[in-house]
Image (tube, rainbow, N blue to C red):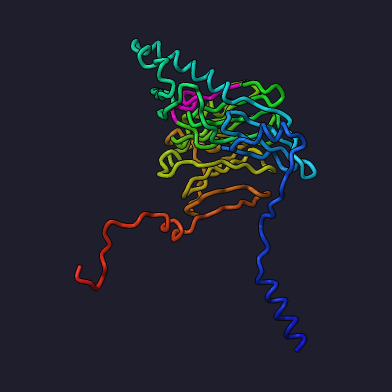
């Protein structure tokens, strides 16, 4: 009887699931650090594994670079994304005024809350007159020297973490006229490369050190696989294998496309079409996240379709089978 009871206890303990994530309360070393980071955060990102560095963007327009050690948080740098956004905004207004003779009436100083819409190669979303644009995505470079910031105007800015100054800017015009959907730094390369994906299912390799698109994009940017460009779902993210930094996985709701930048483009070329060919997997759907977790291992998170259906609104009409109507 004692053995049966012990066995039942073991079975009960096996049925109890341990939490996958254990929350830990962190404390700031300095009150000023807490005040600087106390605004509502709108975007966050972690640095490379074991770096214990966190970037946090707030509604105030500032981005704090934090270092976590021993359960405490210390602010190491503060980047003013709002100041850079205002500078970019004024530049856009200047260009628009040149194209539009009636721009003076559009930017009336008495209407401070008026929104302005940029067209052409700029964002179609309203930008407030004060230049305030919400941060949507952050990414720290592997060497923690650069911070890439994407806002809701569709522009990506790259800041130096050391000097807290803006180093580069990628507008929609530089990305083929399409808004970005995601971006990530390629790990362990001779040059710091930021890979950006867009709504047009294209991707670009930006050399941060040279402040220009790299040779791969310059030579092959217009020869991407038509099968990728014609996907109904947009590219939502890109992930790299740290042990194979040239291997990138681009993923959307219903596909995963592998691109090995170390392979000669001649080996990937479709000579009949003059384009490149990539390997695409369409086994998982709908994908809500993908991450490379180890060499030759990826984690794919899918949303069960029944769970997706629960988010639908009630139908206006539902036929009841077996009824009169």
Q: Is residue 19 above or below residue 102?
A: below
Q: Of all residues shown, which one is farthest toward the left?
A: 324
Nearer-the-camera pick, 35 or 184: 35
Left or right: where 212 falls relative to 199: right
Q: Position of residue 264 (x, y in %)?
A: 59, 35
Q: Residue at x 73, y 34 (%)?
A: 31
Nearer-the-camera pick, 202 or 323: 323
Q: Is residue 101 above or below residue 253?
A: above
Q: Of all residues shown, which one is farthest toward the bottom?
A: 1
Left or right: where 290 falls relative to 229: right
Q: Residue at x 67, y 31 (%)?
A: 36
Can see residue 191? Answer: no
Nearer-the-camera pick, 231 or 170: 170
**Numbered label tally:** 0
Can see residue 177? Answer: yes
Q: Residue at x 65, y 66 (%)?
A: 17
Left or right: where 56 falls relative to 99: right
Q: Quick check: is 93 in the magenta stretch?
A: no
Q: Residue at x 49, y 32 (%)?
A: 152
Residue 156's image quarter?
A: top right
Q: Quadrant of the C terminus?
A: bottom left
Q: Position of residue 148 (x, y in %)?
A: 60, 30
Nearer-the-camera pick, 215 or 50: 50
Q: Position of residue 232 (x, y in %)?
A: 40, 44
Residue 319's image quarter?
A: bottom left
Q: Quadrant of the N terminus?
A: bottom right
In the image, which residues are magenta? 168-178
Q: Quick check: is 170 in the magenta stretch?
A: yes
Residue 266's image quarter?
A: top right
Q: Position of residue 205 (x, y in %)?
A: 57, 30
């Amino acid at each position: 009887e004692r053995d049966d009871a012990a066995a039942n206890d073991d079975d009960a303990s096996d049925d109890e699931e341990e939490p996958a994530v254990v929350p830990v309360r962190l404390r700031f070393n300095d009150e000023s650090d807490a005040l600087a980071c106390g605004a509502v955060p709108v975007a966050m990102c972690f640095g490379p594994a074991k770096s214990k560095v966190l970037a946090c963007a707030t509604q105030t327009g500032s981005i704090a670079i934090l270092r976590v050690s021993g359960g405490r948080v210390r602010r190491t740098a503060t980047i003013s994304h709002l100041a850079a956004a205002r500078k970019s905004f004024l530049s856009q207004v200047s260009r628009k005024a040149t194209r539009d003779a009636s721009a003076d009436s559009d930017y009336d100083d008495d209407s401070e809350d008026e929104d302005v819409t940029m067209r052409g190669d700029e964002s179609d979303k309203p930008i407030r007159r004060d230049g305030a644009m919400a941060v949507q995505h952050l990414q720290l470079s592997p060497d923690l020297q650069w911070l890439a910031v994407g806002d809701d105007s569709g522009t990506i800015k790259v800041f130096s973490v050391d000097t807290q100054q803006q180093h580069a800017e990628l507008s929609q015009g530089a990305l083929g006229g399409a808004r970005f959907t995601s971006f990530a730094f390629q790990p362990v390369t001779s040059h710091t490369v930021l890979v950006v994906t867009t709504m047009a299912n294209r991707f670009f390799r930006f050399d941060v050190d040279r402040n220009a698109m790299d040779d791969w994009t310059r030579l092959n940017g217009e020869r991407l696989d038509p099968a990728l460009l014609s996907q109904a779902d947009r590219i939502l993210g890109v992930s790299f294998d740290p042990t194979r930094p040239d291997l990138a996985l681009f993923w959307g709701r219903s596909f995963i496309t592998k691109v090995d930048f170390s392979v000669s483009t001649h080996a990937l070329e479709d000579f009949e079409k003059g384009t490149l060919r990539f390997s695409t997997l369409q086994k998982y759907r709908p994908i809500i996240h993908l991450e490379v977790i180890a060499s030759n291992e990826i984690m794919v998170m899918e949303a069960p379709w029944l769970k997706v259906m629960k988010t639908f609104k009630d139908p206006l009409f539902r036929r009841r089978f077996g009824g009169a109507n």
